[in-house]
Amino acid sequence: MSTITAGRDRSTPLPFTCPSWCAVDHATQDVPRFPGDRDVIHRSAHAWLNSAGSSDEPWELSAHLASPELGYAPAVLVVDVGAPLDPYAEFDVEQADQLIRDLKTFTARVQQMRDHLVAAKEQQS
Ligand SMILES: [Zn+2]
């Protein structure tokens, strides 16, 4: 009969293999994990966009990949707005493609505004 004790022996190999993009240090989790454990979520490093230059209400937009161990649910691209527990969305591949198209359109429009800003600044000087 085996006994599960609290805490993980950090020298014990993990019972699963992370995808190459996983940035989680699963060995630091205090609860022992086992193959098929639904609480094991592989997550990538975050990509960030924040409100540099905003003084009142700072905001941030982040994106990362998340995938449950053994694929009991599909991997998703998670986009978070703001701090933890604020709105977020999960995208599959097709939805991520649409998000990327929308972001390119958004970026092009911001570029146009930036160019108008330059023109306005030149007229003022
Ligand atoms: Zn992992």
Image: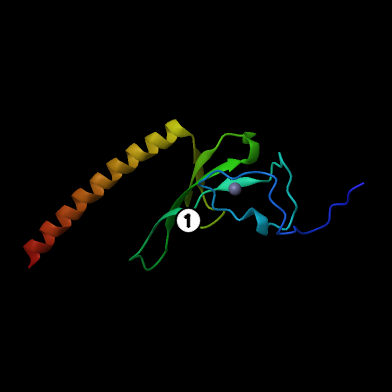
Decide which of 64, 36 is in the foreground and name it.
36
Q: Is residue 89 left or right of residue 99?
A: right
Q: Position of residue 83 (x, y in %)?
A: 51, 58
Q: Is residue 81 left or right of residue 104?
A: right
Residue positioned most to the right: 1
Which residue is pictured at 28% across the width and 47% down the height?
Answer: 107
State how the image is colored.
Answer: rainbow
- Which quadrant of the figure contains the C terminus? bottom left
Q: Identify whether 53 is placed above or below 61.
A: below
What is the total number of numbered labels drawn onto the structure image? Answer: 1
Which residue is pictured at 11% across the width and 57% down the height?
Answer: 119
Mark 1 — residue?
A: 82
Which residue is pictured at 42% across the width and 63% down the height?
Answer: 58
Which residue is pictured at 24% across the width and 46% down the height?
Answer: 109
Determine which quarter of the picture holds residue 56: bottom left
Decide which of 98, 65 is in the foreground and name it.
65
Q: Is residue 66 left or right of residue 98?
A: right
Establish whether ligand 1 lies closer than 8 Å to the Cβ of label 1.
no
Q: Identify whether 7 is placed above or below 99.
A: below
Q: Position of residue 52 (x, y in %)?
A: 35, 64
Q: Position of residue 38 (x, y in %)?
A: 69, 41
Q: Residues within 10 Å of mark 1 (few under 14, many from 20)?
A: some
What SS does tag 1 mark?
loop
Decide which of 32, 82 is in the foreground and name it.
32
Q: Amino acid at mark 1?
A: Gly
